[in-house]
Image: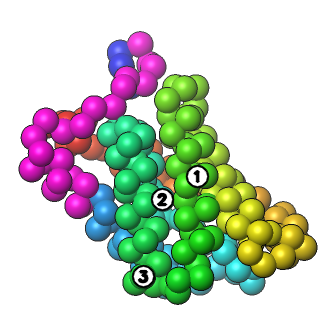
Amino acid sequence: MSDNGRRTAPEAPASPGRRTALYGVLTAAALACSYLELLIPLPVTVPGVKLGLGNAAVLMALERLGARAGFFLMLIKVIASTLLFANLQMLAFSLAGGTLSWAVMALAVRSGAFSTVATSVLGGLAHNVGQLAAVAVLLSAHVAWVNAPVLAVSGVLCGTAVGVVVQVILRSLPREAFHG
């Protein structure tokens, strides 16, 4: 944020080495968070409900580095976490959800009209809409509609939690951590 309270345009780190290191750290954090959420049981039986902790790194990249960096981080996170922690069938669901979530959050960040938490909630909802669209196309529209209410609630709750975490992290890290 600038002095007048509006978001300033993100910029990439100055040196290629620093940029590579930062992207590596964010990717590792996204994958570690994706693994961690596998270990946390949630009190719902609907497939696809997750905390979305890995998306915290994507949102941080969007907030501090811009849409392009956020997109590549999302793409790497989806592919790597699918290969490491899921099966190839899940790739379609994760990619649909991740891409729509990234697009909605990138627009929200670019507009400057939404807080980090609101952007995360929008991203959580969009992620679940993307997954449900993939379910409707690949499996069954009925299954998608039946699971939609639970995924809508989880998108808001988990998006809020992730947004709060990202907001706290970004407030505690100086901008120079991303743009030195």
**Sequence-earlier tag: 2 or 1:** 2
Residue mark closest to the camera, 2 vs 1: 1
Q: Is residue 158 visible?
A: no
Between marks 2 and 3, how big is the CA–CA gap? 17 Å
Residues rendered magenta in the picture = 4-25
Q: Amino acid at mark 1?
A: Ser
The residue beneath circle 1 is 101
User: From the viewer's perspective, is residue 108 above or below residue 165?
Assistant: above
Labels 2 & 1 near each other (Cβ < 8 A): yes
Residue 113 image position (x, y, % from top left): 58, 26
Q: What label sits on residue 55 in the rendered view?
A: 2
> Viewed as shown, does residue 12 lie left or right of 141?
left
Q: What kind of residue is marked 2?
A: Asn
Q: Nearer the viewer, residue 96 or 129?
A: 96
* Element class at badge 2: helix
Instruction: Name the N-terminal-most of marks 3 and 1.
Output: 3
Residue bearing mark 3: 83
Q: Amino acid at mark 3?
A: Leu
Does dot 3 land on a helix, a strand or a loop?
A: helix
Q: Mark 3 packing: few (<14 Cα in 10 Å), some, or many (20+)?
A: few
